[in-house]
Image: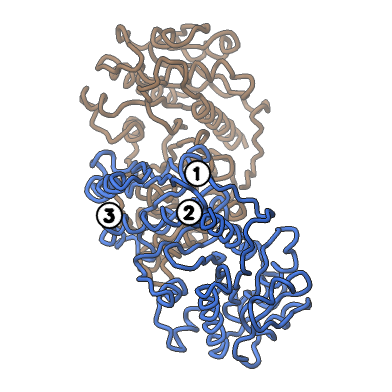
Chain colours: A blue, B brown
Amino acid sequence: MEAAVQIDPAATGPAIAPLAVSIGDPAGIGPEVIAKAWAIRAAHRLPAFFAIGDRRSVEAVWGGPIALIAHPSEAVGLFDQALPLLQVDDPGDILPGTPNLAGARCALDSVEMAVGLARSGAASGLVTGPVAKSQLYAIGFRHPGQTEFVAERCGVAAENVAMMLVGPDLRTVPVTIHRPLAKVCEGLTTDLILSRARVVVRGLIRDFGIVRPRLAVAGLNPHAGEGGAMGREEIDIILPAIAILREEGVDVKGPYAPDTMFHAAARAGYDAAICMYHDQALIPLKTLYFDTGVNMTLGLPVLRTSPDHGTAFGIAGQGEANPRAMIAAIAQAGQCARARAAVQAA
Amino acid sequence: MEAAVQIDPAATGPAIAPLAVSIGDPAGIGPEVIAKAWAIRAAHRLPAFFAIGDRRSVEAVWGGPIALIAHPSEAVGLFDQALPLLQVDDPGDILPGTPNLAGARCALDSVEMAVGLARSGAASGLVTGPVAKSQLYAIGFRHPGQTEFVAERCGVAAENVAMMLVGPDLRTVPVTIHRPLAKVCEGLTTDLILSRARVVVRGLIRDFGIVRPRLAVAGLNPHAGEGGAMGREEIDIILPAIAILREEGVDVKGPYAPDTMFHAAARAGYDAAICMYHDQALIPLKTLYFDTGVNMTLGLPVLRTSPDHGTAFGIAGQGEANPRAMIAAIAQAGQCARARAAVQAA
């Protein structure tokens, strides 16, 4: 993949504000993986960040230094000495592995504050820790997930954002997302492909510094339908979207046979793969980059990444949680924040 | 993956008959990749094999030595000096890249003879070169592909065979195969999952020497349906199949979220992944092993592998065809032939 604006994570580009990292459900592994990421920040050259959440839930799982801050601007100076933390309303006693409603409120406060700080520019982006949807639903949350909540807080309709999975040399975007396989076809429209693809093009330009993004569009059916012999969606739905994108000047190819577009040589030919359904996008990404794939939301005014794992209540508080995905999410947000700053400065 | 019978491709186990390699359409890249595989047989420690097809179509694309044979038994002694070749009826002049009906007849004769020799034991297995279905249809061929033709010649119903994709540390088997995505669900039944899984268990025992094969079954829907919230096929179709297989003593787990079962650590936990549709099986295999994945047909009395590529008429005769997939298919057939001989001898 080509990055027209060269991004070196250690480079001293325009100064960027610290990243806001919401701790997610305080009874999950969020506090632990954020603290562990801070502890090995130097080895991964992580940008300055601060946690938003509950101090005691971090202390319950980690013995390192914490610096309470009142404003994000304090985080940069303190980042070398301690994990900067913005406290939300105290949820009371939180037992790792045992979620409760106070914890769910803490999780929601945490992501809400992170969005607000990112929108104001006090944070250069947000990284969201894992939440438990069932817990959030119990306190009145009415969104399918954090992504839709963040979109609403930013005033963006959910269909105008795109979920992009980011690995070292592969980016994939599902057009339809959380649908049973039997309902993928009825949810797939030319308009939805267009909407996602346009969001992706803008995101690759703004957040990755790619001047002229190259898209590869997957087919829906085996062998991309074999010219209509094995499904007509390529002809009726996907090709019209590709034609319109080309008219708009987008560098886009496809539809490709879904099984032949994700090997190393193929990946080198595009900057993002537009996939027709969840597992078409997720299988190649997680087959290659299970621990380090980053989930990124494009189409928002703010930068947002998240590790692609859940609360893992079953192992919370035992010191066993692997911080690699959180580290990757923070590093990716930092790289994109620098690219965004460089693009704006150019 | 565990191989209980240790198979070293260079080991001197029971002597095995040579492999029969059908050249496929003589105007495609089959002749070239078979000849190239022979030329570097030593580096890849390939077992003795012989080509079945048309001598002149090999000579048209390769300048190396060819030894015409009248019976497979001559191939072993000649294999070090020349590419052994069994001539079928002369198709006349064949121009690489320009298929014709005489070439299609040659391709069909070639695979038919290969099946017969493998069934008789004169060949220890068959490796089928790529054919062009449209050409075969023009001469009256009425099967969806070579696999069904080989199955019929062996007296096995097509639903009682399984297509297995084999890579160095991953084997995947699609339950439904060449269906439009919209028709996957209506083709997926508990009985079909059972039928494929049983064929796979027998194949892993007989052809890979795995005493107690471990199967991992994929879900159909994102996140394996999330307990019915995102599709009910896991509950209604897949779990009943798993329960029956367990009753039969099969070591089987699942259904797994399709995106989290193909990374390296997950792959180490099973010997074959039973997948619900074509691309669920093909995407992970080809993402990891694009050039070297082998297509193997299980459930036949004979061993059969094939390289997972087509005739590539567009590059035929230009010396550019990559023989890696053909080499992998021959090597895999040889390993399985030795394992089969070892299992029978044990």
**Residue B119, percent from left and from top:** 42, 26
**Residue A56, percent from left and from top:** 69, 86
Residue B122 appearing in the image: no
| Figure check: A246 above or below B39 | below
What residue sits 45% from the left and 65% below the top? B223
| Figure check: A277 above or below A88 | above
Label 2, on which residue?
A283
Q: Quadrant of residue B109?
A: top left
Instruction: Report, in whole angstroms, how far the alpha carbon at label 3 lies from the one at label 2.
Output: 19 Å
Amino acid under disc 2: Ile
What residue sits 65% from the left and 70% below the top? A49
- Frontmost of labels 3 and 2 is 2
Taking depth in this image into account, of A104 and B303 the one nearest to the observer is: A104
Q: Are marks 3 and 2 on the same chain?
A: no
Find residue B312 and name its label.
none
Q: Are marks 1 and 3 on the same chain?
A: yes
- Categorize mark 3 by other alpha carbons within 10 Å: few (<14), some (14-19), many (20+): many
Mark 3 residue element: helix
Which of the chains bears the disc numbered 1? B
- Categorize mark 1 by other alpha carbons within 10 Å: few (<14), some (14-19), many (20+): many
Label 3, on which residue?
B182
Which of the chains bears the disc numbered 3? B
Instruction: Report, in whole angstroms, how far the alpha carbon at label 1 lies from the one at label 2.
Output: 9 Å
